[in-house]
Image (cartoon, rainbow, N blue to C red):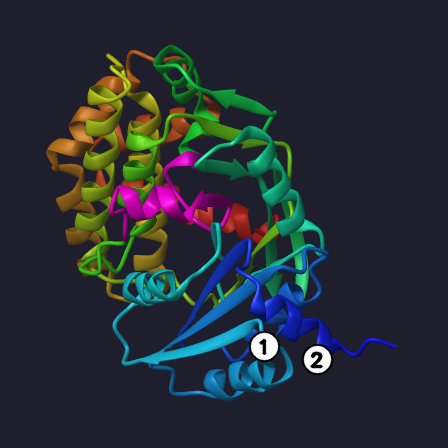
C-alpha cells in the first residue's frame, strides 16, 4: 500500500501544474475548511502557498499543522501588510504553470481545480473566468445560496469582447480573482501584480491589466468555488469612511477601461456597478453605528460627486434591470433622507431573504 507521504514526495519533486495562493489574516474560524478543500482535490499536482499576513489568532498554527502533513503546502509569514502584499508574496514564491487565488473564508469543490486546469489547457488561454456559488451563513447555518454560471465562450477579437462586456454579467470579469485562472508566465511577462497601496477593490486593477494584455478571454460553465458570506464574520467588508473614495476610484478605472479599450460610448455596466457600490457602502456605514447626522453628511457628500452625476446621465440613456433602475431613481433625487430610507429597505429585504 502506497502511503500519502510517499505520493507527496513524488509530487513535490515535480513542477506543479497549479499554484494556489491563500492569504490569511485572523482567519482561524474558516482556514481549516479552506485548506481541507484543497487537500481533497482530484487534481494532485498542485502546491498551496499560505501567507500569514500578521495574524494574531491561531491561523499560523493551523496552517503549519497542514504543512507538516502535506509537502505540497508551504507557509510564508509577513507582518500585516494587507491582502495585496500577501498575494504578491505568494506569487513570487509560486512555481506552477497556472495561478489560482483562494480566500481563507471560502472553499472549493473536490474537482474544481482539475476542471479549471483542463479548461485552460483546452482553450490555451492566459485568462479564464468561471462562475461560483455565493453562500450566506448566519450563526454557522447556511441560510441561502445562489449560483453564478456563465455560458462557455472564448472571446478573441475586440468585437467579441466589446459585445460581451456590454452585457451586465461581464462585470464579474473586473471583480474578484478567486474565480479566475491565470497563466503564471503571462502575469510575469506583463509584470502584473497587485497594487499594495490599495486596501479595497484591489482585484479590479489587477484584472484590468490582465484584460488589457490577454489575447483571449475564456468563460467556462463551472461553479465550483464557494464564496461564503458569514454575516458579521466576513474577513473583508468592514466600514471605513474612505470607502466612498475607493468606490469612485474603482469606478473611474473601469469606466476609463471600457471607453478606451472596449470603445464603448455608453459604459453602463460600470455606472450601474458604481451606484450599487454606493448602496453597499451606505449599508456598511449604517451597520457601523455612526450617528444619523454623520450618515446624512456622508450621503450628502457622495450625492454631489461628479462620478454620481455622470453615472446617472449614462444610465438615463439605457434600459435597465429593476435593481439598477431603483438605484438610479433614488440617487438621482439627490435627497440624503430618501437614500437613507431606501438603503434601510434594501438591507431589510436582504435579511428577510437570508442574503
Q: Secondary structure at mark 1?
A: loop
Q: Which residue is mark 2?
A: 5
Question: Pointers 2 and 1 in contact (CB under 8 A)?
Answer: yes
- The relative height of residue 44 versus residue 178 in the rendered view (above or below) is below
Q: Earlier in the sequence, mark 2 or mark 1?
A: 2
Residue 334 vs 71, above or below: the answer is above
Find residue 142 and report its horizontal and vertical position in percent.
67, 60
Question: Horizontal placement of 289 versus 17: left or right?
Answer: left
Badge 2 crowding class, 10 Å Cα cut-off, few under 14, some 14 to 19, many 20 or more, is few
The residue identified by callout 1 is: 71
Image side of residue 10 versus residue 31, left or right: right
Do we see residue 77 in this rendering? yes
Image: magenta residue range: 172-193
From the viewer's side, name the closer residue of 216 and 146: 216
How many marks are shown on the rendered structure? 2
Quadrant containing the N terminus in the rendered view: bottom right
Q: Does residue 87 show up magenta in the picture?
A: no
Q: Residue at x 30, y 58 (%)?
A: 285
Amino acid at each position: 500500500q502506497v502511503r500519502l507521504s510517499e505520493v507527496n514526495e513524488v509530487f513535490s519533486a515535480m513542477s506543479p501544474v497549479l499554484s494556489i495562493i491563500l492569504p490569511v489574516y485572523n482567519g482561524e474560524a474558516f482556514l481549516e475548511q479552506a485548506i481541507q478543500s484543497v487537500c481533497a482535490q482530484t487534481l494532485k499536482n498542485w502546491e498551496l502557498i499560505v501567507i500569514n499576513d500578521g495574524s494574531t489568532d491561531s491561523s499560523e498554527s493551523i496552517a503549519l499543522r497542514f504543512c507538516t502533513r502535506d509537502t505540497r503546502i508551504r507557509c510564508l509569514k509577513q507582518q500585516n501588510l494587507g491582502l495585496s502584499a500577501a498575494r504578491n508574496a505568494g506569487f513570487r514564491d509560486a512555481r506552477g504553470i497556472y495561478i489560482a487565488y483562494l480566500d481563507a473564508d471560502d472553499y472549493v469543490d473536490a474537482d474544481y481545480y482539475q476542471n479549471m486546469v483542463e479548461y485552460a489547457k483546452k482553450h490555451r488561454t492566459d485568462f479564464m473566468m468561471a462562475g461560483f456559488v455565493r453562500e450566506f451563513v448566519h450563526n454557522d447555518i447556511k441560510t441561502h445560496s445562489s449560483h453564478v454560471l456563465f455560458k462557455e465562450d472564448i472571446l478573441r477579437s475586440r468585437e467579441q469582447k466589446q459585445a460581451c462586456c456590454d452585457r451586465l454579467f461581464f462585470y464579474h470579469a473586473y471583480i474578484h480573482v478567486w474565480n479566475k485562472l491565470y497563466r503564471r508566465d503571462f502575469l510575469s511577462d506583463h509584470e502584473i501584480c497587485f497594487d499594495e497601496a490599495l486596501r479595497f477593490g484591489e482585484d479590479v486593477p489587477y484584472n484590468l491589466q490582465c484584460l488589457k494584455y490577454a489575447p483571449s478571454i475564456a468563460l467556462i460553465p463551472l461553479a465550483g468555488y464557494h464564496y461564503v458570506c458569514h454575516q458579521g464574520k466576513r474577513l473583508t467588508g468592514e466600514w471605513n469612511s474612505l470607502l466612498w473614495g475607493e468606490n469612485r476610484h474603482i469606478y473611474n478605472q473601469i469606466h476609463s477601461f471600457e471607453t478606451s479599450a472596449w470603445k464603448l460610448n455608453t459604459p453602463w455596466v460600470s455606472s450601474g456597478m458604481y451606484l450599487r457600490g454606493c448602496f453597499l457602502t451606505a449599508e456598511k456605514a449604517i451597520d457601523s453605528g455612526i450617528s444619523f447626522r454623520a450618515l446624512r453628511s456622508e450621503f450628502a457628500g457622495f450625492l454631489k460627486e461628479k462620478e454620481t452625476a455622470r453615472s446617472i446621465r449614462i444610465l438615463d440613456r439605457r434600459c435597465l434591470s429593476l435593481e439598477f433602475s431603483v438605484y438610479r431613481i433614488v440617487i438621482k433625487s439627490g435627497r440624503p433622507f430618501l437614500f437613507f430610507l431606501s438603503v434601510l429597505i434594501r438591507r431589510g429585504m436582504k435579511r428577510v431573504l437570508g442574503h
